Amino acid sequence: MKVVIDVSEPVYSEFEQMARRLGRSTSDLIQEAMELYVREEKPSTHSILDLQPLSVGSIHKPINSRAELEVLEQLNKVYSEPADDQILLHGIKRKVRSTLKRG
């Protein structure tokens, strides 16, 4: 099948040079690139419901007391919150964006 596409001259020239270095035609490389793109961008047709359960071992110690449950809840809270460096980075990004918008 023949297809016509618009590509900038510098990009196509670089692509032609790459094809020559590889000893292949530009047509072959374009076809391979398109197939790769389709393969990688194609959404998964599998559902998590199709997966079989996987055993990762036995429970070492079940949670039996309210105190143990509270410790687990605190650990979940601590590790689910963003780290200080993530908060700082978010603040810096926000400041840079607002400065660029004003400038």
Image (tube, rainbow, N blue to C red):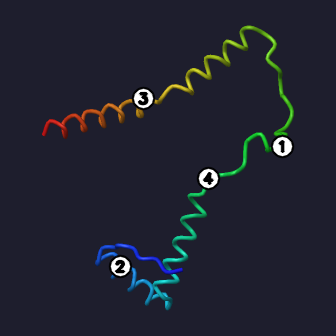
Whole-angstrom CA distance, mark 1 to mark 2, is 47 Å
- Which of label 2 and label 3 is nearer to you? 2
- Kindly identify which residue carries mark 4: 43
Q: Residues within 10 Å of mark 1 (few under 14, many from 20)?
A: few
Query: Element type at marker 2?
Result: helix
- Kindly identify which residue carries mark 1: 52
Whole-angstrom CA distance, mark 1 to mark 3, is 38 Å
1 displayed left or right of 97: right
Whole-angstrom CA distance, mark 4 to mark 3, is 35 Å
Q: Which amino acid, mark 2?
A: Tyr
- Which of label 4 and label 1 is nearer to you? 4
Which residue is rendered at x = 53% and y = 77% of the image?
31
Which residue is rendered at x = 19% and y = 40% of the image?
100
Q: Residues within 10 Å of mark 4 (few under 14, many from 20)?
A: few
3 displayed left or right of 7: right
Query: Element type at marker 1?
Result: loop
Q: Which amino acid, mark 4?
A: Pro
- Kindly identify which residue carries mark 3: 84
Of label 1 and label 3, which has the lower sequence position? 1
